[in-house]
Image (cartoon, rainbow, N blue to C red):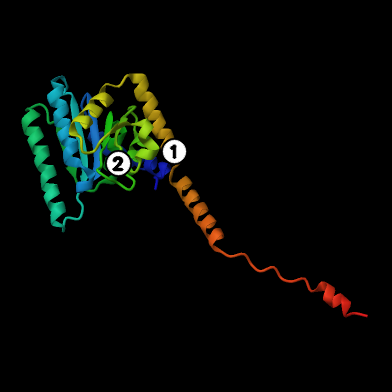
Amino acid sequence: MSISVTEERRVVESAAGKRASEKIKPLLGEQTIMRVDRIEPTKNIVRGFQAYARLLDEHPELLGKVNFLAFLVPSRQALPIYQRYDVDVLKIIDEINQKYGSDEWTPIQAFRDNDRTRALAAMQWYDVLLVNPIIDGMNLVAKEGPVVNQCKGVLVLSRTAGAFQQLGKASIPTSPTDVAETAQALYKALTLPEDERVAKAKQARQAVERYDLNMWLTRQIKDINEQLDRATPPLDTPKNTAPALAAGVS
């Protein structure tokens, strides 16, 4: 599954997208990490924040400089396991802000709603996009980010994300269950030399553009037609009766 590149860019360039973008800009740090997820255990949000905390522990020079903006969509709130995970996510955000924040700086700014326009508009400005699911069919955020980003943003991507097959070489890979490795991946993405940032951002953007939703649909239809062709038995060839008719004519 892919995205409509044209549609994603239309949203961020719309009047609503531009208004959302202007409201996000004051929340950006010298550098900004972002994530956009449904609040579900498989999205691995808590470990992502734990990796950010470890990053700040190991690199205190980043305190007050590297912000984390999270756009989190409530999901399946009627299910107890999702309710508990929601609580866990809010708890880790509060703990990190209490431990590392100050009167002048809030490390994590989290939006807990379903505002797609705001999330897309915000992704124009990330320096690092963290997508670290434990397992995912196809994480479309990993594709949306690169096609709207304007900051040479680097993708930190879980090896178990569905998008990794397509975007692995254009990202900084990480293991979703390894907080230390994810912290290292975040630091690498933040400190990547300019030419490498540009190259990875371009590689990710072009990979998505090359196989956007229209191309994906075309390939799906082609595959279906090929399957139908193989499943349909050939028609019997009618026997040629012309000679017999000719023989009966005198």
Query: In which image quadrant can residue 170 be found?
Result: top left
Work out whether mark 2 precedes mark 1 in sequence or the reverse, and give the earlier one: 2
Residue 101 visible in the current orientation:
no
Q: How many circles with numbers are drawn on the protein? A: 2
Question: Residue 151 placed where, x, y %?
Answer: 32, 27
Question: Residue 133 placed where, x, y %?
Answer: 25, 42
Depth check: give the residue in front, 51 or 91: 51
Say which element carries label 1: helix
Depth check: give the residue in front, 22 or 142: 142
Q: Residue at x 87, y 80 (%)?
A: 248
Label 1 crowd (10 A; few <14 / some 14-19 / many >=20): many
Q: Are marks 2 and 1 in contact (CB under 8 Å)?
A: no
Q: What amino acid is found at the position of numbered circle 1 in the picture? A: Glu
Q: What amino acid is found at the position of numbered circle 2 in the picture? A: Thr
Rendered position, 221 above or below 138: below
User: What quarter of the picture does the C terminus occupy?
Assistant: bottom right
Rendered position, 128 above or below 11: above
Judge from the rendering whether residue 129 lies leftward or rightward of residue 243; answer left or right.
Answer: left
Question: Residue 235 placed where, x, y %?
Answer: 64, 67
Query: In which image quadrant can residue 68 be found?
Result: top left
Which numbered disc covers residue 209?
A: 1
Q: Residue at x 19, y 47 (%)?
A: 41
Question: Residue 66 placed where, x, y %?
Answer: 19, 26
The residue that disc 2 covers is 160
